[in-house]
Amino acid sequence: MQTQALAGVLLACFGLAACTSGPGMADLMPRPSLEMTSSISRPAEPAPKLAAATLNPRQEADAGTLAKDAVEPQQVGAALAIALPEGRPGRAASALEREIQAHRFKDAKPINFGSKKPQDYAVHGVDVSRWQGDIDWQKLRGQGANFVYIKATDGGDHLDPMFRKNWREANAAGLKRGAYHFFYWCRDAASQADWFIRNVPKDANALPPVIDVEWNHQSACKKRPSREKVLAKMQVFMDRLEAHYGQRPVIYTAPDFYGDNLKGAFPDYPFWLRAVAQHPSKVYPGRKWVFWQYSGSGLSTGVKGRIDLNVFHGSAAEWHRWVDHQERIAAN
């Protein structure tokens, strides 16, 4: 009996030492994943907003508008840190996210864009899908990726197999992230919107969702609806996403699709324009834009192979104002 009592005392002492010198009880309890999606069914009540802190369809067979457009881009020669405005709710990754990394990407097929070149813009980013494989996000961030758009879904039943991993790891590395959907013209718009909502977490700190609309010559779907039907289907999809996420979706497109369907359409929506040979002002005259995809042949130490390169239309300060505005409207 004395041996048992001594053992009990020793166990109690070890337990006390662990509680005082180790992690707190809250750290020992399992925590819900921030990457949970309603993959089985969506709750009837609104999904809670996350408290914690952005395509490459041309490589896959299955696949804005600033209030003032005349923004003079500013060169950034080194990383620029901008302090959080007073009164802004703080979160663990905010300081990291707000540090602007200077552009250090290379290009396998560099283009002379003339007087208005991508390097003149302060805020660079990338877009990715499963084709980039495992990404070293810290290296990619250090190369100048301040934001990323990550492929989430296409059609009404395909989820990019790397989406959840990319979504989680991009956030941990301090990139502003958003998700995009490749629109499939052989499926109704409502089911595609529901599929995106089902798989992409509702996070007020994320960039606005993107609808990627283009003609995919490799797709099994050969439909080319009329302009009237294209715009109607897009409107259904975008209305559904805006109602859920609280942010107006960004429209990504390419020159041929734009010429067939989007000239003069959706003037109140932000645009993300692909223009890999000339500045968007020449390819899409008169169209205001928020993002410009200027290369599909970017090179980075964080990615094996090539990656799409993009810029934000504005200075570093304008980027922060735009991001802050998106977060405010998503939180309301």
Image (cartoon, rainbow, N blue to C red):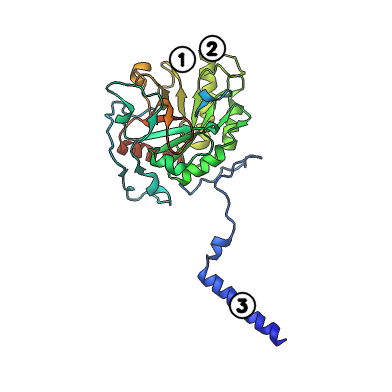
Q: Is residue 80 left or right of residue 48?
A: left
Cα distance in 3D space between marks 1 and 3: 73 Å
Quadrant of the snapshot with the C terminus: top left
* Disc 1 + disc 2, Cβ < 8 Å: no
Which label number is shown at residue 47? none
Q: Residues within 10 Å of mark 2 (few under 14, many from 20)?
A: few
**Mark 2 element type:** loop
Amino acid at circle 2: Ser
Closest to the observer, 228 or 70: 70
In the image, what residue occupies the spot 38% across and 33% down?
105
Q: Quick one: SS at disc 3?
A: helix
Tell me if residue 201 comes above or below residue 234 in the rendering. below
Structural crowding at the residue carrying mark 1, measured as other residues with C-alpha within 10 Å and reported as few (<14), some (14–19) or many (≥20):
few
Residue 190 is situated, as x and y percent measured from the top left of the image, at: 59, 27
Q: Residue furthest bottom?
A: 2
Give the residue at mark 1: 256
Q: Amino acid at mark 1?
A: Asp
Residue 327 seen in the current view: no
Mark 3 sits on what residue?
Answer: 12
Q: Position of residue 323 (x, y in %)?
A: 39, 38
Q: Is residue 174 above or below residue 125?
A: below
Q: Nearer the viewer, mark 2 or mark 3?
A: 3
Q: Position of residue 28 (x, y in %)?
A: 57, 62
Measured as percent of width and height from the top left, residue 107 is found at 39, 28
Q: Amino acid at mark 3?
A: Ala
Evaluate if marks 2 and 3 touch, with contact meaning CB atoms under 8 Å apart.
no
Q: Which mark is drawn over residue 226?
A: 2
In the image, 102 versus 191, the foreground residue is: 102
